[in-house]
Image (tube, rainbow, N blue to C red):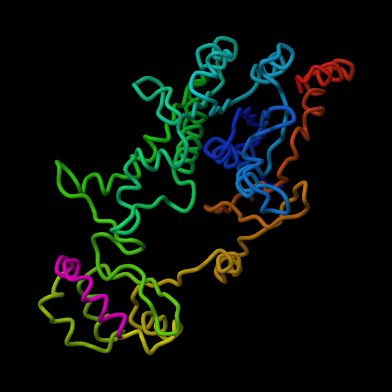
């Protein structure tokens, strides 16, 4: 088997919900051993979000493959000792507990670095350490709102959230890249470091375009539904057979070609009301009507054929079933099978394929599935395990 870049790296994670699990799943994909510490009997509360995947939660299946599940009640001394023993030789600790909880348990970077100076500690929180919002509760929807994302998303009449957990995903990916940076730094210095990731800062980074667009009090981009706020035509358009096509123009050359070859209306290209992108945005509703009229007698296949021939960027507006069945993903063999407590499940290979190795694609763990094997590695006897189980420590 080819060597993976994170083979031999051990990650201990006190994680729940999405941001931290999404981060550590990326690490596991690249070969790291990820020990997911969960509460006995209950586990990561994301396990209970829904039952859509043959009884398992959709979020949990997505973010937890290739991990080991260890149940510990870290409030109990025997369980706390197990955690300390793991961290004494671990490479990385990832945590997204409630603000201040990790520090109260002695899991802050300074405390851990004192007895394992190579450990990397990644703290993921809603708002980051310090500042007036440090202790404020933070969930994905709330950060979408606080970061300004919701203010520029949706229709003119109503703001909207994203349809997936983008604030969690943003924080998880910055945590992942931050840990990779810390591992590279450790290879040069021999010392671990702390990675501090906040959901708010992750999302505000992604808001760079609308923030600069509204620089020094200028008007922000208007909410335009699925259309582009500042380029037109760029967005969804109804087609005669009841479908919707998504298309986008980027420059004046494409506008002329679009009028000539897609709309079959070359005179429109010289209409002064649409002579520039600024003019087209100003008169977008009238132009939208003209485009929809041109598409009214066509099927989705016919519209896409015209767009392709004109080399105008386009896409179908797919639903989830369409994406599961997407011909491009199938043609590139992007799906594989992983195991789980409910049997084999399809799983998308990680984006960014590397020619030198295959990503690890292993099972979604049952709650506490690896507790006994991990404790045995630490030299804990069967009798001690039985006592810990009786006390509810594992």
List x then y, in percent, for residue 315. 43, 71
Left or right: where 30 falls relative to 55 = left
**Vertical order, 26 against 378 (above or below):** below
What residue do we see at 38% from left, 90% from top? 297
Highlighted magenta segment, given as a residue range: 277-293
Nearer-the-camera pick, 313 or 4? 313
Nearer-the-camera pick, 338 or 113? 338
List x then y, in percent, for residue 215. 17, 43
Q: Tell me which secondary structure the magenta stretch mostly adopts.
A: helix
List x then y, in percent, for residue 302. 42, 86
**Vertical order, 158 against 271 (above or below):** above
Left or right: where 78 falls relative to 232 = right
Whether the magenta-drawn stretch holds residue 288 is answered as: yes
Examine the image and state in which quarter residue 212 appears: top left
What residue do we see at 61% from left, 37% from top? 6
Quadrant, the C terminus:
top right
Examine the image and state in which quarter residue 258 appears: bottom left
């Amino acid at each position: 088997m080819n060597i993976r870049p994170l083979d031999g790296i051990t990650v201990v994670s006190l994680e729940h919900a999405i941001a931290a699990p999404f981060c550590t799943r990326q690490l596991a994909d690249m070969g790291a051993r990820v020990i997911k510490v969960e509460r006995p009997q209950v586990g990561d509360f994301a396990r209970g979000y829904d039952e859509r995947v043959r009884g398992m939660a959709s979020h949990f299946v997505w973010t937890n493959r290739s991990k080991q599940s260890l149940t510990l009640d870290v409030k109990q001394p025997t369980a706390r000792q197990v955690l300390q023993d793991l961290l004494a030789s671990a490479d990385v600790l990832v945590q997204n507990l409630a603000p201040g909880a990790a520090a109260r348990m002695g899991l802050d970077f300074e405390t851990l670095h004192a007895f394992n100076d190579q450990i990397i500690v990644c703290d993921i929180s809603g708002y980051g350490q310090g500042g007036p919002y440090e202790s404020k509760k933070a969930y994905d929807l709330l950060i979408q709102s606080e970061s300004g994302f919701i203010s520029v998303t949706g229709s003119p009449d109503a703001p909207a959230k994203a349809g997936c957990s983008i604030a969690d995903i943003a924080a998880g990916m910055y945590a992942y890249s931050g840990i990779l940076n810390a591992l590279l730094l450790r290879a040069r210095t021999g010392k671990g470091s702390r990675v501090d990731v906040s959901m708010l800062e992750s999302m505000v980074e992604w808001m760079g375009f609308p923030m600069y667009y509204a620089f020094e009090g200028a008007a922000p981009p208007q909410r335009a539904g699925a259309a582009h706020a500042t380029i037109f035509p760029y967005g969804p358009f109804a087609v005669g057979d009841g479908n919707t096509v998504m298309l986008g123009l980027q420059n004046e050359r494409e506008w002329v070609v679009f009028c000539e070859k897609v709309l079959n209306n070359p005179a429109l290209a010289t209409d002064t009301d649409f002579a520039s992108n600024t003019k087209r945005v100003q008169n977008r509703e009238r132009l939208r009507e003209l485009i929809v009229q041109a598409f009214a007698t066509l099927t989705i296949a016919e519209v896409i054929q015209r767009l392709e021939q004109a080399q105008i960027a386009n896409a179908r507006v797919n639903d989830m079933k369409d994406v599961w069945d997407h011909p491009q993903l199938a043609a590139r063999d992007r799906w594989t099978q992983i195991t789980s407590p409910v049997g084999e499940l399809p799983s998308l290979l990680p984006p960014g394929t590397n020619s030198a190795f295959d990503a690890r694609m292993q099972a979604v763990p049952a709650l506490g599935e690896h507790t006994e094997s991990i404790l045995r590695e630490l030299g804990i006897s069967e009798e001690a395990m039985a006592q810990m189980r009786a006390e509810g420590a594992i």
